[in-house]
Amino acid sequence: MIALTSPYLWYTTRATGIVTLVLFTLVVALGTLVSNRIGGTIVGRFELNELHRSISIVAMVFLLIHVLTTIVDSYVATGIISVVVPMTSQFKRVGVALGAISFDLMVAVLVSSVMKSRIENRSWRFIHWFSWLAFIASIVHAYLTGTDTKDGAGLVLVIVCSLVVIGAALWRYAARPTRASGRTALSPLATSDTPLPSDPTTRAFPSQPRAQAQRGRK
Amino acid sequence: MIDANVLPRVLHGSSRRPLSLVQHEEAFAPRERVTSLLDELEASGLTGRGGAAFPTARKVRLLREQHGRRKWVVVNAMEGEPASHKEISLLSSNPHLVLDGAEYLASMIGAERIDVCVARDNPTAINHLNQAIHERERSAKREALIELRTLPGRYVAGEESALIHWLNDNESLPQYRPNRPSILKIGHAPALVDNAETCANVGLIGRYGAGWFRGLGTPQSPGSTLVSVTGALAHPTVLEVALGTPLRLILAAANADSDPQALLLGGYGGNWLDAAHLDVAYDNEALNPLGAAVGAGVIVVLPRHGCGVLETQRVVRWMANESARQCGPCAFGLPALASDLAQLTRGLADASGAHQRLIERCEAINGRGACHHPDGVVRFVRSALRVFASDFDQHIKHLPCPGSTSPAHFVPVPSLEREEELQWL
Amino acid sequence: MAVRRRSGGFLLKVNPILCDGYGHCHELAPELVEMDEWGYPIIVKTPTPYANVAALESARYAVRGCPRQALRIERVIDQS
């Protein structure tokens, strides 16, 4: 391996890391807006969905640069292997491992989304749920490996992004729409009560999706 | 050997206990060997007795054309209609006739496996079938492997795509089938799904031929059919009648109220028929122009002192709860219909708005589910709006209707299962 | 996708089981899709001629934009 190092590689890694974090925070927020059926009057629902998709591509580009500059830079001993296989880095083992996990999951989400029309919707959604896990891993990765994130503006940024995503997760659950089909693979979400007016002679239903169809799925 | 123009046919020889294999062979000794089974089936004009009345021979030909080393015959003995008891009567009388028919169907399409599907909450049927299957195994009469499968007792579980989906994936949920006619498959094996009574009739045609079969019934609706009569009569009854028999005679044979207000025909997804048409023949040619059909052989008798609005509401409420909740228009639309009907039944405020909403929602819901469950409910509600138009008017004006003095219910609607307890697996 | 069809029409079809009432189809193809009171699509049942390029484009956007991949464009053979 050619010893190639330069402060500019290192700065690029750090900068793209920050940008990726911010962009994916935005992506997650947009994703929750789509899932909770926001939009339709001022902003179209499909527009939020398109933004979600487009920004995630941009974020992936920055992520890729972040990963490539890390591999190429021999100042820190993080090679191709450690970027995809967790716990194989000499430098900041756990922090990089989390980055690797996050990267693996993001790639899976990306690939499944590119092939969305060719795979079963259930499978796509199963993989897509892991994007939450990917984000959590990336935030902890940012804190552990980040040079800038331990204090000052970097720390504020990490905290703000965490709060946005935690808030999005809570809101995602609290305002989840009543759905006819409870068929979300491994979804922890049950639908909330029916929005229909209560009927004096009948119990309000459907209040729950069909009994745990998630069990026994292939 | 039974004469061609004698009833009962499928219920012939029935007693307190189901016919054993030996008794069955004796009572149904064939006349002469039927040479080409498929030609006889085609000539007989037999149509499905499960509700859709699809020509059985056409279904068999479709399955014959399918490529596949392994094919299946699935006998649908689910009897999801609460007002129907014909399947259980048939199985309590002569399960061997049903299994004969299934074996004939298997030989016609080249299938080596037969699955008989029964609801889990029907232990009588399960017992009778188990016994019959074991009898056949011991007598080495087997040409195909017959297995009994027990499914959740949901209304939609008896729908053929739900049936096949359960056999494949263990969930009794109807499937989206955009390309009709589509072949159902168990794994890679094409499957022929037929109602148990249809199979029994195939058993008869296999022994006595098409000419014999056509000895009863009408030219367009040949043969006999089982009818479950409930409602305004002392005991729910299952009769075997020739197609084309006037409704009035059927009611008389069942000892039902001879001067009813209306009849519910077909099942919960069927139609109300005004009692003015009691002299009409019980076959689809006569019933269809009146907006009704034979359906699953269900007749519920509503007496003059019953309330059609209330009975409709009770049925729709139950049917809404039986939705698989996969499709929005059904999952949300059917409870909305139930809610509107409740407002109309109780004469609550805005009953007139409820009536209008009912009509609009029927239009909105129709045809927008993956299966025909919501369509059946819409058909049923629309027939109620037609037949009980004057009663609906009374309810809207908060005035009593002919049925409001009696608190009794006549349509046998099961109690609502709680949503958490509904089993689909 | 780039084949030009001059004759015949198409139908936008929804798989009601996959559909979860997101409503993007109504936004992207309002000339073909109405919404019912529960947020689910009511799609026109009569075929739209392929000559109606704007509608075809809207339909394609709707198919691509559906979060549940519940839509399809089906070709209807010209009856005449």
Image (spheres, helix red, strand yellow):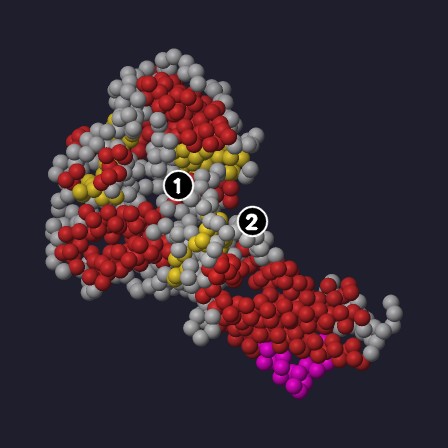
Residue at the image position 69 percent from the left and 75 percent from the top:
A17
Residue at the image position 33 percent from the left and 37 percent from the top:
B51
**Going by the image, does B81 lie left or right of B251?**
right
The part of the chain drawn in magenta is A145-162
Q: Nearer the viewer, residue C48 or B51?
A: C48
**Distance from label 1 to label 2 (Cα)?**
23 Å
Prevailing secondary structure class for the magenta stretch in the rendered image: helix
Does residue B100 belong to the magenta stretch? no
Q: Residue furthest bottom?
A: A152
x, y (%) of residue B134?
A: 45, 26
Say whether residue B408 is visible: no
x, y (%) of residue B170?
A: 49, 44
Q: Nearer the viewer, residue C35 or B123?
A: C35
Residue at the image position 43 percent from the left and 54 percent from the top:
C48
Rendered-image quadrant of the C terminus of chain C: top left
| Residue B398 disc label | none
| Residue A218 disc label | 2
Chain to which mark 1 belongs: B
To which quarter of the image does residue B361 belong?
bottom left
**Going by the image, does B66 lie left or right of B39?**
right
Kind of residue at disc 1 = Gly
- Label 2 SS: loop
Q: Residue furthest right?
A: A2
